[in-house]
């Protein structure tokens, strides 16, 4: 099968998307940019962040908070 028959999912940056459970570095501590963005999203959502997060946990939490954010989530009126 070639890529046209079975395309690889892409993220917004154009690189292949990979499930966080498959990340080689997913157990490493969250990066500074992840934590900064999470603080912003959590503040907007009125949520508290856990003290320690892995890269994979941070990514999953970012996805969830983005969906809940009125600024970045889906418009419920559409």
Image (cartoon, rainbow, N blue to C red):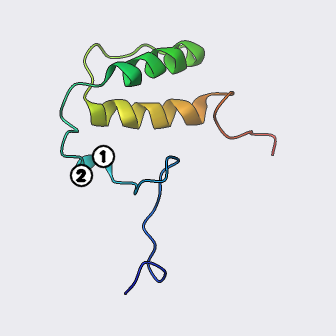
Classed neighbour count for the residue bearing mark 2: other residues with Cα under 10 Å, few (<14), some (14–19), many (≥20):
few
Q: Which residue is depicted at the point 28% across and 25% down?
A: 30
Report which residue position mark 1 lands on.
Answer: 20
**Residue 59 in the image: x percent, y percent?**
38, 35
Quarter-of-image position of residue 60 = top left
For the N terminus, the image quarter is bottom left
**Residue 52 in the image: x percent, y percent?**
25, 18
Classed neighbour count for the residue bearing mark 1: other residues with Cα under 10 Å, few (<14), some (14–19), many (≥20):
some
**Residue 26 in the image: x percent, y percent?**
23, 38
- Asked if residue 57 lies left or right of residue 61, the reply is left
Outermost residue toward the front in this view? 14
Report which residue position mark 2 lands on.
Answer: 22
Outermost residue toward the bottom in this view? 1
Which of the labelled discs sits on residue 61, or is there none? none
Name the foreground residue: 13 vs 40: 13
Q: Which residue is depicted at the point 38% across and 16% down?
A: 49
Do the numbered discs 2 and 1 sit on residues whose CB atoms are within 8 Å?
yes
- Asked if residue 76 lies left or right of residue 33, the reply is right
In the figure, 50 relative to 2: above or below? above
In the figure, 39 relative to 59: above or below? above
Could you tell me how far apart the alpha carbons at marks 2 and 1 are, in whole angstroms?
Answer: 5 Å
Q: Which residue is depicted at the point 18% across and 30% down?
A: 28
């Amino acid at each position: 099968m070639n890529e046209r028959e079975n395309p690889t999912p892409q993220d917004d940056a154009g690189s292949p998307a990979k499930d966080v459970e498959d990340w080689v570095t997913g157990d490493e501590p969250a990066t500074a940019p992840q934590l900064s963005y999470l603080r912003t999203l959590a503040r907007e959502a009125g949520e508290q962040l856990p003290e320690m997060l892995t890269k994979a946990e941070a990514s999953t939490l970012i996805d969830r908070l983005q969906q809940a954010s009125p600024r970045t989530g889906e418009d419920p009126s559409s």
